[in-house]
Every structure is written in structure tokens, then in C-alpha cells.
Image: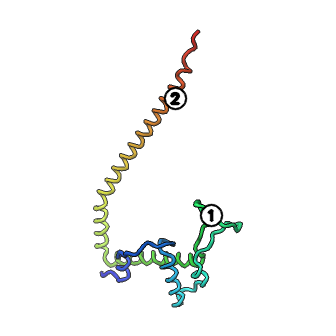
Amino acid sequence: MKTPKDIAALVKPTHKAPAARRVWSVDLDNTWIPFFMATNVTGATELPSEDLGAPLRLAKAKDGSVRFGTNGRPTLRVAPGLNDAITNVRVNFIAGLQTFTDSVIKDDKDGYQAQVRNAQKAGQPIIAAMQHDVDEAVMAYTAARLAQASAAVEEAEHIVAPTLEPAAA
């Protein structure tokens, strides 16, 4: 089975500069806004111009006051209609990935199962090494905590011990 061009394009690396504001890990200004302007032109969507012209809005609390982040700056959110449209694209994208996978499994079940077996076999040493590292780290952490607790008990004994000696008569 030949990989469709749109699927092949998805897995090719691109070397674009990192983007600014992201929604679902996709640049808002350079991808989502132009995409939805194009879908509005073709009639696939009917997003309001104000959502595309001012995609970010101040986030507000139920009482209408502006919300602030932990950094002290006002919090922004994506316009609700635009956010809903982006969610639809994401859901449909995931469905497309799953549909493609299902069709490959249906058309080449043996090839897919061989790929799964190869991946599992290749992953076993990595999983075993990670488990070994975690086991060692847990033992070291536990030993350090026990040493810490033992030192705290010794310190407490030195503080309390002089007061526990019987008074001289």
C-alpha cells in the first residue's frame, strides 16, 4: 500500500522558526487565523470577522473582573468561536489519523502486526534500562531519606539525653 501524499507530508520534518501564541500546539497568527480566513472564503466555515481580527480576549472571572496570571499579567484566552473551530479541526485530524491507521491494518494486517512486534522488541531494552535506573534511584532516595531520619533522631537524642539524666541528690 502506498502512503497518501497528505499523510506523507505530515511526517516530514519542517524547519520553521518557533511561533508565538499557540493553540493546540499550532501557531495562532501564522496558521489558525489564515486557515480560518481561507475556510471562510471557501464557505467551509463562517467564523465572525471579529474572532479572526481579534482572536485573543481578556479572560474574566464570573464577576466580570480581569483575571491575572501568577506572573501578575492579565490572562488572555482565545475567542470562544475560534477556539471551538480549532477544537473541531483537532478532533477531525485525530479521526483522520485513526481512519488511516485502521485502513492500513485492514489492508495489511500482517505488515502492521510485524511492525508492532518489531517496535515492542526494539523497545524492551530501553524499558528494562529505564526500570533499572528507576529502581536504583528509588533505592538511593530511600537510603538518603533513612539517613536523614536517622540523623534527625540522633540529634533529638543529644538534645533530650541531658534532660533525661537523673538529678544529683
Note whether 43 is above or below 164 in the view shown. below
Note whether 124 is above or below 136 in the view shown. below
Q: Quadrant of residue 2?
A: bottom left
- Callout 1 crowding tier (Cα within 10 Å): few <14, some 14–19, many ≥20: some
Where residue 15 appears, as percent x and y from the top left, is 37, 75
Q: Quadrant of the N terminus?
A: bottom left
Q: Secondary structure at mark 1?
A: loop
Residue at position x 40%, y 45% in the image: 138
Color encoding of the figure = rainbow
Q: Viewer-proximal residue, 135 or 47?
A: 47
Tell which residue pokes out farthest to the right in this image.
Answer: 63
Where residue 144 appears, as percent x and y from the top left, is 42, 40
Residue type at mark 2: give it: Ala
Can residue 101 be seen by looking at this rendering? no
Give the residue number, with chain letter if any, for mark 2: 156
Residue at position x 37%, y 76% in the image: 14
Circle nearer the N terminus (2, 1): 1
Q: Nearer the viewer, mark 2 or mark 1?
A: 1
Where residue 21 appears, as percent x and y from the top left, is 51, 72
Residue type at mark 1: give it: Phe
Residue at position x 33%, y 56% in the image: 127
Give the residue number, with chain letter if any, for mark 1: 68
Q: Quadrant of the C terminus?
A: top right
Q: Secondary structure at mark 2?
A: helix
Q: Viewer-proximal residue, 128 or 159?
A: 159
Inter-mark Cα distance, 2 to 1: 45 Å
Instruction: Tell me if 77 is positioned left or right of 12 in this view.
Output: right
